[in-house]
Image (tube, rainbow, N blue to C red):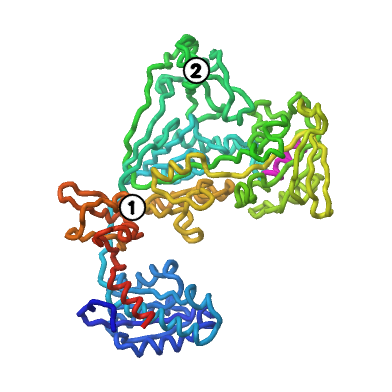
Amino acid sequence: MSILKGKPDDDIKIGVYVCHCGHNIASTVDVEEVARRAKELGEVSVARDYVYMCSSKGQNLIRQDIMQLGINRVVVAACSPRLYEQTFQNVLRESGLNPYLLQVANIREQCAWLHEPGPLATEKANRLVKGAIKRVIHHSPIEEQSVPVFPATLVIGGGIAGIQAALEIANSQQIVYLVEREPSIGGHMAQFDKTFPTLDCSACILTPKMNEVARNPYIRLMTYSEVVEVSGYVGNFNVKVRRKARYIDEDKCVGCGICVEKCPWSTESEFDADLGVRKAVYTPFPQAIPNIPVIDKERCVYFLKGKCRACEKFCEAKAINFQQEDLFIELHVGAIIVATGYDVFDPTPISQYGYGRLPNVFTSLEFERLCSPSGPTGGQLKLADGREPKSLAVIHCVGSRDQNYNAYCSRVCCMHSLKYSHLFKEKTGGEVYQIYIDMRCTGKGYEEFYERVQGEHVRFIRGKLATITADSPDSETGEKLSLSCEDTLLGGLVNIPVDMAVLCVALEPRHDAEQVAQILRLGRSRDGFFMERHPKLDPVATMSEGIFIVGCCQGPKDIPDTVAQASAAAARALAMIVRGKMETGAITAAIDETLCSACKVCNALCPYGAIFFDEVSNVSRVNRILCKGCNVCGAACPSGAISTRNFSESQILAEIEGVLV
């Protein structure tokens, strides 16, 4: 007895197409038998099997049957619909059929890959196909929507990823808003000394790009600013940006630096990883863009005590303005590219490594600043007591590949560890020890750089560091460090005395990643980075249509991969702008207003903000452009007023009946 209440009345002609997928399916499932059994069902007009149904020839089989036999429903038994549903939908669209009169039965991942070859696997495939046939009977045409795309893009984050994305779009003569929360663009790359594997001066290759951003007439640069609110949808985002007060008039300032020179108050420099000092009025680094100082309200004595104003007295351009206030700016953009970067792991909790307690134990970012000519020591490596170090230990995977902190590999640590060995040898000629778990040198020229460093007589110890301790009571003031670690190649413990140790710390999601995710309605993976739509086939898009993620906010990566990803996201944004419109998904929620009880449960639960309450009609409504068809609302609706297009009750029950009966 059927569990369905009724069936469509139109003349249904179903075509069933079973794919061998080479040997992926055919080695486990008797695909000819599946096609033969499907043909025996009364609703099926034709059933075929083919070695690669997704190939041009396989698609032509479907296309010909639609045109010649009048097929008006299609079932494809093949691989995951996530991979190939759109391919077959396009076949239906090109043949004059609505693309949603299609059902894909996944007999590879849900059958062939799960079972041993034999009749049971074939029987399961038969039931999956029968369920798809019963379901597709109840499919009805769904019309897709398109929305106009406003020809402007917002890029959030002014590191190398944001810079590259902004330049790619601006060079196509399209408007870009580049928003950076720090006083200057540049990001972490501006803090580096040299880049692997070519050892280019980081500032030398980054500064021209920063200057290009400043000169490009299509880039609206907004530094010392942050996004506080995003509303709207793909093609039509409304963005509110808070532009923090610099207390310096950017139109009047000539960048002479007199205010910085005359400021009597100093504090730790964030740009120098707190190893150096800066003034209360400061420019982060010499090549900063824009090269306009900012007054740190939290450190300025005038704001704290109402005294001083030395900078104002000496500024001939009269650019100092202590009455300046934050501005809130409204932007209208069609696409958003998120390039918010990363934070470095704080190794303080790993107390056995002595960071924060032993003065000559540094993190990788701190070592970068010590090596940089613009750093606190002018590029000279010095110990806490002012001596030049004669030996260095570089410890890999601090906070990475560690179940206690971050289980993932940070990807770049092996290479910048090798770079530090070269830099230390270059500057001091001293001994270098690399303490590593595995060497992962996978980029272009990386293995060659590894071999180059090996030739510089760096000592490699394969194992896990146990402790870093003071070699003597005087070590707290700058004497030798003693490292105890396992050497798995020698099969024993070793103790290494060194002057300096560098902890190559993990790359982590930014501390405000959750806040950004909420503003932009982005998903986050288990490790905290922003979630892409598909890790292989769509690594820059997100589930929020029109919002893209690039660089290390998506996961740890090196500069070349970051630049490539930024260019890819720029291309996606440009494609939307050039077309002038964007097609949105048709599988969305629908509310039966006669059943809606105005309880507003769905409004609060929608993860995409797609449901709103109409006070006039006293019912909830769905913005189909924002909706992703997740059906959270439908599952929670107490009155059963919400359903999802192409996932109606009749369709689901029909599929269940086909599988079970």
Question: Taking 345 as reference, is 17 above or below it?
Answer: below
Q: Magenta part mainly helix, strand or loop?
A: helix
* Front one among 10 and 213: 10
Q: Disc 1 marks which amino acid? A: Cys
Q: Can residue 61 be seen here?
A: no
Question: Is the residue marked by circle 1 packed among few (<14), some (14-19), or many (20+) residues within 10 Å?
Answer: some
- Tell me what residue is drawn at x 81 percent, y 32 percent: 480
Quadrant of residue 268 within the rendered picture: top right
- Tell me what residue is drawn at x 44 percent, y 49 percent: 570
Question: Taking 125 as reference, is 608 above or below it?
Answer: above
**Image quarter in which the N terminus is found:** bottom left
Residue 225: x percent and y percent? 42, 32
Callout in the foreground (1, 2):
1
Residue 193: x percent and y percent? 64, 36
Look at mark 2 in the image and give the residue it sits on.
300
Look at mark 1 in the image and give the residue it sits on.
606
In the drawing, does residue 15 fall left or right of residue 535?
left
- Tell me what residue is drawn at x 25 percent, y 64 percent: 143
In the drawing, does residue 616 fall left or right of residue 234?
left
Residue 187: x percent and y percent? 53, 37
Q: Which residues are magenta?
A: 416-426
Q: Is residue 315 magenta?
A: no
